[in-house]
Every structure is written in C-alpha cells, then in structure tokens.
Amino acid sequence: MSGRWLRTHAPRDDASVRLLCFHYAGGNAAMFRQWHALLPGDVEPVAVQLPGRDDRHAEPPYDEMGPLVAALLPAVVPLLDRPYACYGFSMGARVALELVHALRARGFPLPVRLFVASSAAPSLRLPVRGWSEPDEGLIAYLRELGGTPTAVFDHPELLELFLPVVRADLAVVGRHDPPSRAPLDVPIRAFAGADDTGASPERMAPWRAETSAAFDLTVVPGAHFFTDDGLRQVLRTAAEDLLAVDPSGQ
C-alpha cells in the first residue's frame, strides 16, 4: 500500500477501519509514523505523502487544489473497500475536505468520520499568510507557527529546498475558493489547540457548516501544533469515535 502517495508503517489487514492522514503545509507523511503504536489495532493509519518532499523530492509540488485532488483520487479509491475516515492537519484538513467532496461527486463511499485539526473553517474565507509574501515574510510566518526544525532556518541550503515546497502547499489553500455546495453527510470532529490564534477554537467552530451530520469541537493543549498531551487526546478521541462506528460503516 505504498506507491507514491501512501505510507503505512504497520499494515493491519484485519483492521475494521482505515484512517487516511493528511499532513500540514511543508510537512510530510513522517508526522504520522508513530500513530500505529498510539492507535488501537482496529484502526489502520495510512499517511498521504504529497509530491515535493522526502522520497518524492524530485517531483514538483502542487500549488492548486483541483489538480492535487484529481491526482490523489486514483491512489485513494482502492482503499475504500472497508470503512475509512480522514484526518487532516492544517492544510491537510482542507485537502481532506476537498477529496471527500470529489469522492461524493463521483459516487464513491464516503468516510465514516472527517477529523480536521488546526485549520480555520473554510466558510470564514480567511486569507492564507506566507505563500504570496517574499521569503522573509514566509520565514517569519513559519517561525510564528512553530513546527519547523530550527536547523532548517539555520542552513541556507535547507531553506532553499524547503521554501518552494511550503510556499506551494500554502498556495493550494490560499488560491482555493471553495464553491457553494451542499454540506457533506459525514460527521465532523474538529480539534483546536487552546492557544492557537490562526485556527482558534472560535475559528474552527464554523466547520459545523460543512456537514449535515453531527459536529463536535474538541479543544486540546497546545497552539497550532499540539503538545504531546494534546496529541494523545486527539488520538484517544478519534479512536473512540471510530470504534463506535457500526461495522457496516454507518
């Protein structure tokens, strides 16, 4: 189940549900590498790896949502043979949302849950910082967010490789204008860091407009990037939601 797009560190053929995981702008699938050890055996985490990073560094990153989702669809469809859910962090939340809409438009099975984290609600249409700014502005934004290793900022050769990728990732969201459409019939749970300003709990609450099903907002310790305790709370809550799902996927 690897290929170009997908990474799984512990295949679980007997898992009752898959969890497709979408990383943040400038991130990679490695952010989910320990999740198999932190989730129950009935949940199989599968991380999405976008082009332009790690073993896909030679591939140009996408900078628009439509082409990205269109390219991702064929990789994801074979995984829909059992109940699945999606977890998107920051930029990944918006990619996951658009992927689910694309799956619905094509008549494919929908996820049993959509988990979104550290991402202001699309309906707010807030401007995305960084992607259209000079390098100095983008670097300042990344320092403010946290999550980027200090070594990247201290070594110009690393910055030269990193900035075009994170700029393209941010452009995916910054250029995207979500169309008017019916909400998903998929339960959504949003996770917000208590100290996050860009994706505060107040800015994540309007994610409820994206679903006609149940919506929950969970506030966890941390800012844009959660503390270790916050992450454990996210995984514990997500697992509880998933294991409460009927085996038929309802």
Image (cartoon, grey):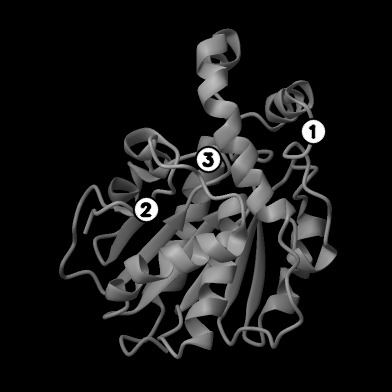
The answer to whether 74 is drawn above or below residue 173 in the figure is: below
Q: Could you say which quadrant of the image residue 110 lies in?
A: bottom left
Relative image position of residue 206 (x, y in whole percent): 78, 69
Upstream in sequence: badge 3 or badge 1: 1
Upstream in sequence: badge 2 or badge 3: 2
> In the image, what residue occupies the spot 72% across and 75% down?
208
What type is the residue that disc 3 sits on? Asp
The answer to whether 141 is drawn above or below residue 215 in the figure is: above
Q: Which mark is residue 229?
A: 3
Q: CA distance from mark 2 to mark 3?
A: 21 Å
Relative image position of residue 104 (x, y in whole percent): 51, 85
Q: CA distance from mark 3 to mark 1?
A: 34 Å
Q: Is residue 148 found left or right of 143 in the rendered image?
A: left
What type is the residue that disc 2 sits on? Ala
Label 2's element? strand
Label 3's element? helix
What type is the residue that disc 1 sits on? Glu
Mark 1 sits on what residue? Answer: 133
Labels 3 and 1 touching (C-beta < 8 A):
no
**Of residues 187 and 86, the one drawn nearer to the viewer in this rendering:** 86
Relative image position of residue 224 (x, y in whole percent): 67, 41
Mark 2 sits on what residue? Answer: 47
Q: Is residue 98 found left or right of 41 in the rendered image?
A: right
Labels 2 and 1 touching (C-beta < 8 A):
no
Label 1's element? loop
Residue 60 at least partly seen: yes
The answer to whether 248 is drawn above or below residue 206 in the figure is: below
Upstream in sequence: badge 2 or badge 1: 2
> In the image, what residue occupies the spot 51% across and 12% down?
157
